[in-house]
Amino acid sequence: MKELTMGAELGNIPKVIDFVDRELDELGCSEKSKMQINIAIDELYSNIANYAYGEGNGEVTVVIGNDSKPCTVRISFQDEGKPFNPLESREPDTTLSARERKIGGLGIFMVKKSMDDVWYEYKDGKNILTIRKTL
């Protein structure tokens, strides 16, 4: 497993994506899977940067690991912000037009649909959200 810790700032998203992409390239990840993972990273890191620490500053640790059979990647996002499980949020009504839908919730919905598994835990004072994708 490899990890990267950075400030919970939107400007760090490209650095996180580069870090993960290097690992995905070593695993022979398809461009489609890489794109789906990058979108998930953007969504999840953005949520932490925008909401986890309120007006304060904090850090995010991104941990990436893999299993070889089948080739699967796991990426965890860990922060010490206020406890929040985004998986408990109400799913958006995708039958409504964009104008009719309430703001929020579409990003995590897309993450759940594009990953094989997504789970959350609050442990040792940390939010830990993990995504898993079979490559």
Image (tube, grey):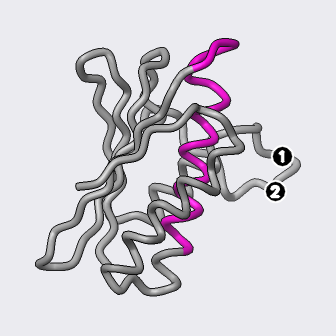
Name the quadrant of the C terminus: bottom left
Q: What SS does tag 1 mark?
A: loop
State the residue at coordinates (50%, 28%): 59
Q: Which region is colored magenta? A: 35-57
Q: Check disc 1 and give the amino acid type.
A: Glu
Q: Which residue is mark 2?
A: 97
Q: Residue 82 lies in magenta, yes or no?
A: no
Mark 2 surroundings: few (<14), some (14-19) or many (≥20) residues within 10 A = few
State the residue at coordinates (64%, 15%): 54
Q: Position of residue 84 (x, y in %)?
A: 45, 23
Q: Which residue is mark 1?
A: 100
User: Furthest-right residue in view?
Assistant: 99
Q: Position of residue 1 (x, y in %)?
A: 23, 55
Residue 64 is drawn in which quadrant?
Answer: bottom left
State the residue at coordinates (54%, 45%): 44
Q: What SS does tag 2 mark?
A: loop
Q: Check disc 2 and give the amino acid type.
A: Ser
Indicate left or right for 67 with 99 as reference: left
Indicate left or right for 79 with 134 as reference: right
